[in-house]
Amino acid sequence: MERIGHHGCVTVARDTGIARRWGMLTDLVADGEVVILSGAGLSTESGIPDYRGETGRRRRAEPMTYQTFVSSASARRRYWARSHLGWRHIVDASPNAGHRAVAELQRRGLVAGIITQNVDGLHQAAGADGVIELHGSLHRVRCLTCCHRTSRHALDRRLRAANPGWHARSRVINPDGDAVLADDEVESFRTVDCGGCGGVLKPDVVYFGENVPPSRVEECYALTERAGLLLVLGSSLTVMSGYRFVRRAAARSIPVVIINQGPTRGDGEALLTFDAPLGTTLTALVRSIS
Ligand SMILES: [Zn+2]
């Protein structure tokens, strides 16, 4: 913590603190071996909303849980109807300055790995390689019976063909590509099954109530343990699936830096925290290093 003077030098003391902390961050990143852990806050500037606002308060719509999805055909129809609309929003989203800055740091050889909690594919769209998608990707669909994976684009074509004349509209879109719809619009929607075996199709994302595959978790732990810096971007770390890597890094004395709008659960483990917008901050970081 910065010491703030008693006699009106508060601003000066804070500014000095920021300059010093910014210098520490640029030095750490310039040293390389950075492992990035990104969350929904990195994609909000691309128009993909976060489940939690800046206050950390949960928004109105609840995410689908795995248990609900697998146990209820009507829940699956509701999901696919809403997702059919929401998908358009995901496909139309473009990477923002924050995604481009991450890709640029990787291009300069400073990044050892990118772990993202996001399912939107925007890191890759910005040019990043080898991204570990902790919670999967909305760009793929998986059959729950034969496990065959297909592209979401292919499913989108099949859903359009199965639903000619279905033109529901929604203005509320959630980060997992779920749109809010009226009941009658859901009931008139037709889902499709696996083209190979007729099994139930599920987006290849890890739902709430579902575990990240253990091999993927181990890969992320291994990456974290080799990191020179764990840089958290746009995550409040509310979900343990991401927070555990912060805890692992802290336990191994690997510095953790968090850039996020609002407080995070990992602030106590972090060497430095920056409460700041991601796009401008990461663009400035790239510029500071060059
Ligand atoms: Zn199948």
Image (cartoon, grey):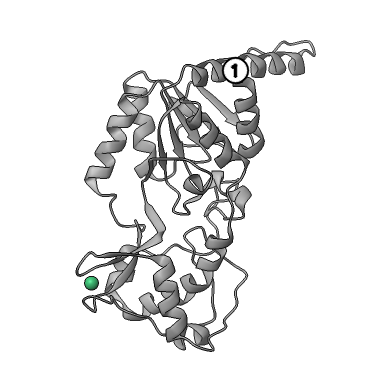
Q: Nearer the viewer, residue 221 or 122?
A: 122
Give the crowd class for mark 1: few <14, some 14-19, many >=20 residues within 10 Å.
some
Count of numbered badges drawn on the protein: 1
Q: Is residue 87 above or below residue 4?
A: below
| Percent coordinates x, y for residue 168 in the rendering | 57, 81
Quadrant in the picture for residue 193: bottom left
Q: Is mark 1 within 8 Å of ligand 1?
A: no
Residue 163 in sight from this viewpoint: yes
211 over 92 or under it: above or below: above
Residue 230 location, quadrant? top left
Quadrant of the frame with the C terminus: top right
Residue shown at the point (22%, 45%) measured from the top left: 214
Q: Quadrant of the N terminus?
A: top right
- Image spot of residue 30 (x, y percent): 51, 18
Viewer can see residue 79 = no
Q: Nearer the viewer, residue 162 or 211?
A: 162
> Looking at the image, which residue is at 29% across and 56% down?
210
Q: Residue furthest right?
A: 8
Q: Is residue 237 left or right of residue 92?
A: left
Left of 132 or right of it: where is 286?
right
Quadrant containing ligand 1 reads bottom left
User: Which percent across, then down, holds residue 16?
Assistant: 69, 13
Closer to the camera, 178 or 93? 93
What amino acid does circle 1 point to? Arg
Judging by the rendered image, the residue that carries numbered circle 1 is 21
Q: Residue 180, located in which quarter of the rendered image?
A: bottom right
**Residue 70 rendering spot, x and y as whole percentages:** 28, 70
Q: Is residue 206 above or below residue 280?
A: below
Q: Secondary structure at mark 1?
A: helix
Residue at 35% in and 34% down: 245
